[in-house]
Image (tube, coloured by chain):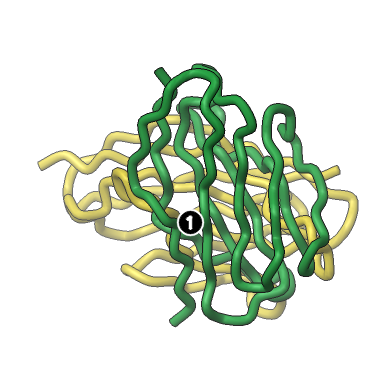
Amino acid sequence: DVKVTQSSRYLVKRTGEKVFLECVQDMDHENMFWYRQDPGLGLRLIYFSYDVKMKEKGDIPEGYSVSREKKERFSLILESASTNQTSMYLCASTKGGRGAFFGQGTRLTVV
Amino acid sequence: AQSVTQLDSQVPVFEEAPVELRCNYSSSVSVYLFWYVQYPNQGLQLLLKYLSGSTLVKGINGFEAEFNKSQTSFHLRKPSVHISDTAEYFCAVSEPGSARQLTFGSGTQLTVLP
């Protein structure tokens, strides 16, 4: 089975801190994604990557950046965390358009 | 651009009753369609998918969905629900061959009552 692992289940950070969310997949998938999930808004795409060192903005990239130095790892970076970035963050990976595999999610609280 | 509409944000139903969760999509091209389930404080798990072929798709946990191209719908059904089916359900669409994948609906919270 494909496994997508997010480094933390729960995080609490202070406003202004730099935050790193890490995601690792073990099935050699080319495509990796970061979503945020908020009540009533469903999942919104922040960034995605279709190859090492390649990235594209999703629907809500403001306040975020990403890094993909290795195929299996995709990092989401909050340069200066703000309270409106309190959310559930979900990482996913896929090969082709046939459905994505998700990590367990990271619930981030910015205080 | 593609979009997904889940018509019901909350669906309460009694245990052992049938349920249908509705999903409509819009796209100018052919699509792949998916249903995902999310249990509390978990990631999303794929329930079923339509890629091509038979329009009736069977998934895990006794769920099935039917692709209706003329009505641009992909409704999820289960003939008899259990308490353990209580979760949030997301419909999603993607375009074949597109790296930018999975536009999600806003979700339907299914609550199964004893």
Tell me what residue is drawn at x 77 percent, y 68 percent: A52
Which of the pair A42/B81 is nearer the observer? A42
Q: Is residue A35 left or right of residue A15?
A: right
Q: Is B13 drawn above or below residue B51 in the view shown?
A: above
Q: Quadrant of the N terminus of chain A?
A: bottom left
Pointer 1: what residue? B36
Q: Is residue A81 above or below residue B48?
A: above
User: The numbered mark 1 sits on a residue in which chain?
Assistant: B
Position above or below: B56 against B42: below
Percent of width and height locating residue A92: 57, 59
Which chain has been coloured green in this picture?
A
Q: State the image quarter where residue B5 is shown.
A: top right
Considering depth in this image, is B8 or A64 the residue closer to the camera?
Answer: A64
The answer to whether any part of residue B5 appears in the image is: yes
How many discs mark residues in the rendered view? 1
Chain given the colour yellow: B
Residue in the image at 41% along x and 28% along y: A13
Quadrant of the rendered image containing residue A88 = top left
